[in-house]
Image: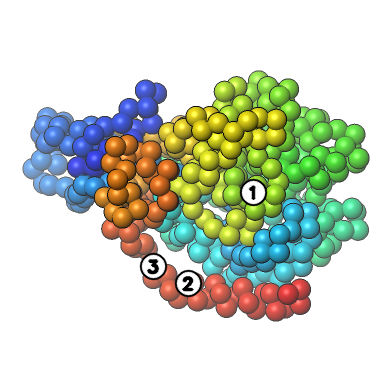
Amino acid sequence: MTTILVKNADVLVTMNDDRQEIKNGAAFIEDNQIQWVGASSEIDRFIAESRPDVARDGLNATIDASGCVIIPGLVNCHHHLYQSLTRTIGTAQGKSLFEWLIYLYPIWAEMTPEAVNVSAKVGLVELILSGCTTVADHLYLYPNGCKIDDEIQAAQEIGVRFHPTRGSVSQGESQGGLAPDRVCDSEPDIIRDCIRIIESFHDPEPFSMIRVGLAPSALFEVTADLMRESVELARQYPLVNLHSHLGETQDEYRFCMETFGKRPIEYAEWCNWAGEDVWFAHMVHPSKEEVEWLASTNTGVCHCPTSNMILASGIAPIRDMVDKKVRVGLGVDGSASNDGNHMLGEARLAMLLQRVGWPGFESRADRFSAREALELATIGGAQVLRRDDIGALLPGKAADLVAFRIDDLTHAGGQFDPVASLLTCAPTQAWLSIINGRIIVQEGHFLPFELEPVVKKHNQLSMEMIERSGVV
């Protein structure tokens, strides 16, 4: 048994049904679960009355979080970890999505298993330092012997809660797709590998550290048959979710109408992609009727504000979705269509974009609050991933919590509302991160391994891959 007490936080944000925020808050953790949250002044009585063994033997660790805000660990619902290998390529040149993909695919075709593993480490550490404790990743390219196992190994070494989704691309350039044929897989091989990954790694139990999803990349990169087969396969197993890109750009809408005679959501529904086990990344351009459809079918959405801005995809109507009770979470998207991995920063941008508005709507500073954005990044992401054990700091929930200092230079003057200051002020790094009851970041330092050699190796692999491609 391992016990950790985090106490004296200026505010502890529970994300319970009443959205309670506890001043001078504390959390008592045993092994991988939260056992108690409340005011720090009450913890001694709780331990004395409820845990005489701890009162007698003492705690394994006590952390003084004075000057901090404690929040549930942030949940990243969409990422492409391998893309940290190609930051700024394409984004620096101002390419839109389809142009960007066509330009980068030949570089990604040079990836190796080591590159997938090391890039996953880099991206995951960056996410953890930004307050993230749960990560859903979408790996859809497997050249040169790469496997999703390569990034799963990285996640296990770090200790992050991981939702790898087995992506796929089966239609290349010769079939009207964007990817070179050499990076595409046959659909029978894709299904066989999906079965292997589910049966090797998927854990549907509470507090699971790995849950697998199935994720055909996009409607313009796979067939309708693969979309339907993925649904049928996923639903044979408990809590295997379904994920894909959808409704990201106007180019996609034009492609879909010209190729299928349907809008993206109509096509997804035609392929049986709807329901609580489905979530789509982006969903930038839904009509009002399609927002209603998302709500009525309980289909989830992952909002990726930075990627949508840097690729000029548009502003998703998240205010409408939230008002209609659509399940909405946040994602940083790939590091090559964001060039960063900062979940708290993503929540901040989600708040700001909704205030700016979207086509047909005036700008309004009161359209989206800091706390609403924080909800998307915590409990919202948990709901998108169908997890009832994360996203809130409550007894019985997983021991995933992070603390940010608000007594530093960045937050000076923000003490009037320290919770909101996490998003209205410039995003900073986590001072503390506990994942599944294990301290991963302490006083701002990442503990599992030394970072400098990993970053150096990552950059070497990146340059070798780019040089092999001959693109840049």
- Name the front one of labels 1 and 3: 1
Classify 409 as above or below 377: below
Q: Amino acid at mark 3?
A: Phe
The image's colour scheme reads: rainbow
Nearer the observer, 392 or 336: 336
Residue 78 as seen in the image, left or right of residue 465: left
Q: Determine which of the numbered discs, if any, sits on residue 449 in the image.
A: 3
Q: Is residue 237 left or right of residue 397?
A: right
Task: Left or right? Give the position of 328 relative to 293.
Answer: left
Cβ–Cβ below 8 Å for labels 3 and 2? yes
Image coordinates of residue 444 in percent, x first then y, are 32, 59
Residue at screen point 50% across, 64% down: 122
Q: Is residue 427 above or below residue 385?
A: below
Q: Quadrant of the C terminus?
A: bottom right
| Count of numbered circles on the image | 3
Mark 2, residue position = 454
**Dot 1 amino acid type:** Met
Q: Secondary structure at mark 1?
A: helix
For marks 2 and 1, give the CA distance: 30 Å
| Residue name at image x 71 percent, y 46 percent | 313
Residue 91 occupies quadrant: bottom right
- Residue that mark 1 sits on: 309
Q: Earlier in the sequence, mark 3 or mark 2?
A: 3
